[in-house]
């Protein structure tokens, strides 16, 4: 067992009873999250309404400050949201999309919530262009570069693709977007916590993400960063009283937006999820993303080589520099095999058109990597996958 696993496994109770290889979907819960939720309950139960003035109201910014170093952002520039859909919706609502710059650009390999939300903006009179991938698995970089022009208001792009873990050449896209005068909104959900992320080096204008996956922060704690130079010119339509310059003045409309990143808040914050998210951020920060990335590269390569040796189809890039923290393996009867893996306490997931997604994290052992592939072998050999066939 390596040093990271030895040090950190005791902090994640589920590792005692499962082979947990699904952190790309839901990171294991830290022991500290349960303790933090108990603190929330104690504050609510003992302090009642006074808890708002004792930290609750400031949690969206205070928690954002805890996350900011993990994306290379300055304090005060990350604000917490419910999820990526809300964070992206707030940002898009602040953009004008007036002709001739009235086009919203993205590729068809983005996560479905992004596609649904962006496509819905057609009703606002926005021209939404979805660039097709040739195989549904790889990002159509050249086609997107060609499509970026002076009519583009914003490009929405993932840092790592959810189906395959393939990394996208974000700096190249950002450089072309800057030439065209378009903004780049980065969905970093599949990278923050497992890859070094630096908003300055990537050259993006905004970043959205969430805590469910590599950050081990659980659901309900999304986040939004906006390049500080843009803040004053953005006035979200999707807004609420927390975005007001003086929310407790209870002024009538029109809204006077806060001068800083608080203008991207909406209504009353979801306090409990922010309590739960913080221990995961603290652990990831203590481990160090550089160390996490180095271990992830090694273990994903171990998985890839083991799968290749058996002749299983692989849907992730072979080059470790081109993939994130996920290896996608597509053996025969992959969907049914994934269900049987779960029945055997080997936790992974399956995505149609891709295969079984396997994701070791800093708390995973090499033996667990071998267990996943070995259990796939056993399921195919004994035919137990058939019990899940439809």
Image (cartoon, rainbow, N blue to C red):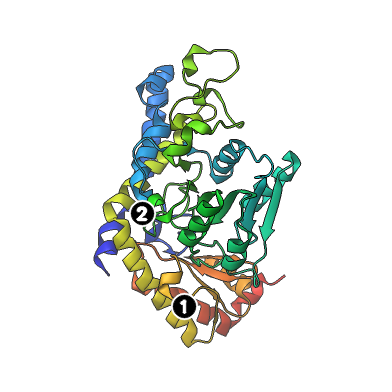
Residue 186: % across, % down: 51, 51
- At 51% from the left and 82% from the top, the residue drawn is 377
Q: Where 301 falls versus 51 (above or below)?
A: below
Q: Quadrant of residue 97?
A: top right
Where's the C terminus, which quadrant? bottom right
Residue 351: % across, % down: 61, 65
**CA gap, disc 1 to disc 2?**
30 Å
Q: Sort mark 2 into few (<14), some (14-19) or many (20+) by Cα contacts within 10 Å.
A: some
> Residue 294 vs residue 222: left or right?
left
Asked which secondary structure carries label 1, the reply is loop
Q: What label sits on residue 383 in the rendered view? A: none
Q: Quadrant of residue 277?
A: top left
Location of mark 1 (residue): 318
Location of mark 2 (residue): 12
Question: Which sits in the foreground, 212 or 79?
Answer: 79
Is there any visible trace of residue 79 in the rendered image?
no
- At 36% from the left and 58% from the top, the residue drawn is 196
1 or 2: tag closer to the N-terminus:
2
- At 60% from the left and 16% from the top, the residue drawn is 253
Q: Sort mark 1 into few (<14), some (14-19) or many (20+) by Cα contacts within 10 Å.
A: some
């Amino acid at each position: 067992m390596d040093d990271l696993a030895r040090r950190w496994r005791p902090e994640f109770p589920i590792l005692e009873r499962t082979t947990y290889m699904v952190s790309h979907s839901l990171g294991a819960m830290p022991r500290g999250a349960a303790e933090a939720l108990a603190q929330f309950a104690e504050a609510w139960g003992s302090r009642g309404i006074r808890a708002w003035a004792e930290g609750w109201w400031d949690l969206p910014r205070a928690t954002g400050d805890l996350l900011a170093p993990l994306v290379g952002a300055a304090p005060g520039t990350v604000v917490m949201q419910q999820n990526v859909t809300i964070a992206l919706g707030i940002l898009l609502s602040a953009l004008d999309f007036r002709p001739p710059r009235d086009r919203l650009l993205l590729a068809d390999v983005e996560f479905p919530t992004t596609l649904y939300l962006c496509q819905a903006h057609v009703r606002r009179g926005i021209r939404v262009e979805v660039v097709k991938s040739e195989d549904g698995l790889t990002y159509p970089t050249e086609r997107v570069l060609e499509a970026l022009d002076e009519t583009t208001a914003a490009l929405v792009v993932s840092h790592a693709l959810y189906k395959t873990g393939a990394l996208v050449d974000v700096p190249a896209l950002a450089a072309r977007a800057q030439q065209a005068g378009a903004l780049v909104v980065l969905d970093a959900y599949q990278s923050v916590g497992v890859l070094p992320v630096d908003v300055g080096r990537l050259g993006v204008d905004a970043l959205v993400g969430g805590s469910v996956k590599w950050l081990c922060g659980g659901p309900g704690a999304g986040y939004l960063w906006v390049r500080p130079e843009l803040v004053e010119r953005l006035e979200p339509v999707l807004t609420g009283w927390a975005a007001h310059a003086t929310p407790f003045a209870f002024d009538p409309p029109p809204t006077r937006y806060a001068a800083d990143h608080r203008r991207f808040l909406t209504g009353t914050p979801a306090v409990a999820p922010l309590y739960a998210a913080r221990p995961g951020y603290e652990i990831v920060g203590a481990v160090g993303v550089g160390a996490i990335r180095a271990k992830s590269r090694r273990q994903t390569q171990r998985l890839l080589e083991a799968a290749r040796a058996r002749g299983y189809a692989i849907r992730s890039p072979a080059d470790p520099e081109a993939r994130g923290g996920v290896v996608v393996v597509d053996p025969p009867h992959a969907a049914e095999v994934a269900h049987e893996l779960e029945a055997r306490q080997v936790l992974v997931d399956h995505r149609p058109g891709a295969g079984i997604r396997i994701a070791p994290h800093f708390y995973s052992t090499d033996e667990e990597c071998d267990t996943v592939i070995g259990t796939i072998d056993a399921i195919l050999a004994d035919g137990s996958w058939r019990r899940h066939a439809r």
